[in-house]
């Protein structure tokens, strides 16, 4: 659980992992985030563009990085703290990345992080890393992901070390392939509808929704 406090107000969000959960919204496990009536401050996790106050994900391996958004209404100092870390394995790294200040904060060593924020700041400020912070969730430039009929194409114009995952709308991994330089093709026989394509590499992460006809 992550709590942010400042200007006499607070907000909380929970990120967890449960084998029966999926990467998308699960009514049995997840809670959508709704802004308070009085918009004083807001903090929520984001996966595939959805906002969560309670976010149960299927596995750390699929979600080593979870975006954590923060919206302030007053310029002041805020405190972000992490609880329930003992529910994770003792050797599981958990880092807070402050993208605005360029800081990787080890929540295991110190579960409290202080920062200053103003209403003009980018609200997509934080990431929670369930690794050592070396594989940042950044969009890898110049990668083109698209679909045509029943084939997914991932164009990579440079050397890369990583994998391509395809998720259905329930968050299940239905296809996986090694990412290589050049055009990567994944044939989706008998597939139809919306899918999420996610390239996870040493260089970063790129995600895009595609439609298979």
Image: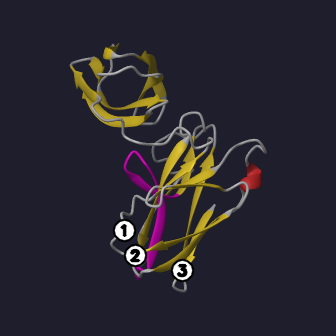
Q: Left or right: where does residue 180 sit relative to residue 95?
A: left
Q: Earlier in the sequence, mark 3 or mark 1?
A: 3
Please state the horizontal and vertical placement of residue 34, each as a whole percent of the image.
42, 67
Residue 110 image position (x, y, % from top left): 71, 61
Q: CA distance from mark 1 to mark 2?
A: 6 Å
Q: CA distance from mark 3 to mark 1?
A: 15 Å
Kindly tell me whether residue 212 is visible in this rendering. no
Reply above or below: 177 against 26.
above
- Tell me the SS state at disc 3: strand
Q: Quickly name the residue at label 2.
A: 118
Q: Going 57% across and 76% down the picture, which residue do you hit?
A: 5
Q: Nearer the viewer, mark 3 or mark 2?
A: 2
Query: Residues in magenta?
Result: 37-53
The residue carrying pointer 1 sits among few (fewer than 14), some (14 to 19) or many (20 or more) residues within 10 Å by Cα, namely some
Task: Residue at 33%, 21% (x, y): give it.
Answer: 158
Image quarter of residue 80 = bottom right
**Category of crowding for the residue at label 2, using alpha-carbon neighbours closer than 10 angstroms: few (below 14), some (14–19), many (at least 20):** some
Question: Disc 3 marks which residue?
Answer: 6
Q: Is residue 154 left or right of residue 66?
A: left
> Which of the labelled discs sits on residue 121, or is there none?
1
Residue 64 or residue 159, whichever sits in front: 159
Instruction: Say few, some or many: other residues with alpha carbon within 10 Å of mark 3 (under 14 / 14 to 19 / 20 or more).
Output: many
Q: Nearer the viewer, residue 27 or 105?
A: 105
Name the quadrant containing residue 36: bottom left
């Amino acid at each position: 659980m992550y709590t942010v406090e400042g200007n006499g107000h607070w907000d909380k969000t929970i990120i967890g992992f449960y084998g029966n959960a999926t990467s998308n919204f699960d009514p049995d496990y997840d809670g959508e985030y709704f802004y308070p009536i009085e918009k004083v401050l807001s903090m929520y996790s984001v996966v595939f563009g959805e906002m969560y106050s309670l976010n149960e994900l299927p596995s750390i391996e699929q979600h080593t990085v979870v975006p954590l958004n923060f919206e302030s209404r007053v310029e002041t100092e805020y405190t972000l703290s992490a609880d329930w870390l003992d529910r994770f394995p003792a050797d599981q790294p958990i880092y807070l990345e402050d993208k605005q200040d360029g800081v990787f904060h080890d929540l295991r060593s110190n579960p409290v992080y202080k920062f200053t924020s103003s209403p003009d700041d980018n609200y997509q400020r934080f990431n929670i890393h369930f690794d050592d912070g070396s594989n940042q969730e950044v969009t890898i430039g110049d990668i083109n992901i698209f679909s045509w009929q029943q084939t997914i194409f991932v164009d990579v114009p440079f050397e890369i070390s990583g994998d391509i995952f395809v998720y259905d709308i329930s968050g299940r991994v239905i296809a996986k392939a090694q990412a290589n330089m050049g055009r990567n093709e994944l044939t989706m026989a008998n597939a139809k509808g919306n899918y999420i394509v996610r390239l996870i590499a040493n260089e970063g992460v790129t995600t895009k929704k595609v439609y298979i006809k």
